[in-house]
Image (spheres, coloured by chain):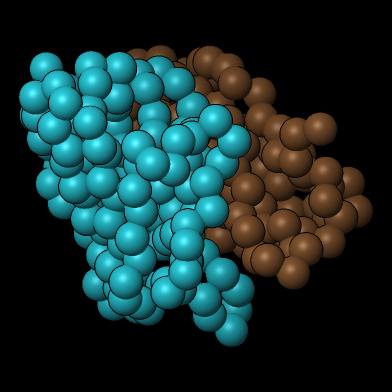
Amino acid sequence: GAVVSQHPSRVICKSGTSVKIECRSLDFQATTMFWYRQFPKKSLMLMATSNEGSKATYEQGVEKDKFLINHASLTLSTLTVTSAHPEDSSFYICSAEARRNSGNTIYFGEGSWLTVV
Amino acid sequence: QKEVEQNSGPLSVPEGAIASLNCTYSDRVSQSFFWYRQYSGKSPELIMSIYSNGDKEDGRFTAQLNKASQYVSLLIRDSQPSDSATYLCAVTRLRGDDKIIFGKGTRLHILP
């Protein structure tokens, strides 16, 4: 099956610094990747859609200057949380869309726990 | 209007019984349907996909699709405590952009 790798799985950073999270599709090319945030016991919240070679599409209420997304290749998208604050502490999950003749399928990365202290 | 609806639960099912999870969707042109399982603190994992009307079985899991009634369900036979998780229903919204829309999930609790 398809595999999506996310790194790091856990990161602690100081308030005011930036942290980058990587999302890689390991055995398929993904023109579209998605970034989610999830608070404990809450639903997945789509933050943005990352399109290879073009600007990301952000959901309403998500600050594009704070959550920088780069999708420079067909297998890698990165999310950079800039000037992180404690309220940015959350579980960040990426997913990648595998396009096949039988239909499109979404595969998720393992997720990244961000703690801002 | 929400596009994919699920009962948030929690749904409590005794161990060994059949757990039935339901999902309805609003877009009639949807063609691909998925069930994901998410354990607490983990990311979702794909457990079933279904594309045509009827039943699709995979081990203890059976996905059922009824496009006329716009619902898709997941049955888990011989429920185990390890099946306790949140189950997310996802549907492709074929409006030219192939976006996959997720429901908010149903929490399932298997009672030992």
Which chain is in brown here? B
Q: Residue A80 location in percent, x, y?
A: 26, 46
Q: Is residue A71 left or right of residue B10?
A: left
Q: Is residue A53 above or below residue A87?
A: below
- Residue B11 screen position, x and y as percent: 55, 18
View extreme (bottom): residue: A101
Q: Look at the image and tell me in which quarter the C terminus of chain A lies.
A: top left
Q: Answer whether residue B45 is visible to the viewer in this image.
A: no
Q: Position of residue A63 (x, y in %)?
A: 45, 36
Q: Nearer the viewer, residue A65 or A79?
A: A65
Residue nearest the viewer, comparing A1 with A45? A45
Residue B46 left/right relative to A14: right
Q: Seen from this angle, which residue lies furthest right?
A: B68
Residue at image location 75% in from the left, 34% down from the top:
B2
Judging depth in this view, the residue of A44 and B76 nearest the camera is: A44
Relative height, residue A109 to residue B17 (above, below): below
The quarter of the picture where residue A5 lies is bottom left
Q: Quadrant of the N terminus of chain A?
A: bottom left
At a point 22% along the width and 31% down the height, the residue shown is A83
Above or below, comparing residue B112 to residue B69 in the picture:
above
Q: Is residue A40 visible?
A: yes
Looking at the colours in the rendered structure, which chain would you say is drawn in cyan?
A: A
Taking the spot 83% from the left edge, 44% from the top edge, the residue there is B26
Q: Nearer the viewer, residue A108 or A65?
A: A65
At 45% from the left and 21% from the top, the residue drawn is A42
